[in-house]
Amino acid sequence: MKIRYSKKRLRANLFIGLLWLMLSILKWVFDDYMNWTDGFFFGMALLYLGQYFYEWRIQYMNITNEQIVVNYPFGKKIKLSEIYWIKKFAGDYILKTEKKDLTINTQIIDKDSLNDLNEILAKLNLPPDKTPFANNGYNSALLSN
């Protein structure tokens, strides 16, 4: 299952990339001489547009039956079976294992994907004091099925 970026984040990266590209083209057309700023504007356009296409194509996370993979260029992997504690801090989820922690930024996740993520995390068999999903509707809805 893919956990998608919010449309707002994707649109913002596309808009900023196109703005840098437009500035680069305008500077190239209306400027008589070339200098390092021409390359800077074009480089920023490439960075933002590259980030947009990467995030649009790859998305934020992939969740399988065994693990969660964050899709950054040097992203983290964490096995679902090794998670012993889920902490909610400032809206983000911090998944803890014996060896590493994984922070999931919920502010940049699409609403539907966030609901899917909450359901998956609620299905983990953790003690009530080790998960923020113990006293809400996720576990009770899962138990009734």
Image (tube, helix red, strand yellow):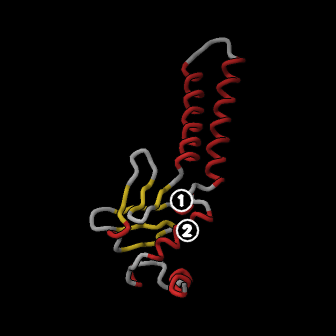
N-term mark: 2 or 1: 1
Which kind of residue does numbered mark 2 sit on? Asp
Residue 79 sits above or below residue 9 on the image: below
> Which residue is identified by label 2?
116
Question: Tag 1's secondary structure?
Answer: strand
Furthest-left residue in this view: 99
- Residue at 59 percent across and 22 percent down: it is 38
Residue 76 sits above or below residue 137 on the image: above
Residue 81 sits above or below residue 43 on the image: below
Using a 10 Å C-alpha cutoff, classify the residue at mark 1 as few (fewer than 14 neighbours), some (14 to 19) or many (20 or more).
Answer: many
* Residue 128, picture quadrant: bottom left
Q: Contact (CB < 8 A) between labels 2 and 1?
A: yes
Nearest the viewer among 118 and 129 is 118
- Residue at 32 percent across and 69 percent down: it is 82
Q: Position of residue 115 (x, y in %)?
A: 58, 69
- Residue at 72 percent across and 17 percent down: it is 30
Question: Tag 2's secondary structure?
Answer: helix
- Marker disc for residue 78: none
Q: Position of residue 104 (x, y in %)?
A: 47, 62
Position of residue 143 in the picture relative to residue 95 (left or right): right
Position of residue 60 in the picture relative to residue 10 (left or right): left
The Cα atoms of the two marked residues, 2 and 1, are separated by 8 Å
Which kind of residue does numbered mark 1 sit on? Ile
> Which residue is identified by label 1?
3
Nearest the viewer among 87 and 143 is 143
Q: Position of residue 1 (x, y in %)?
A: 51, 60
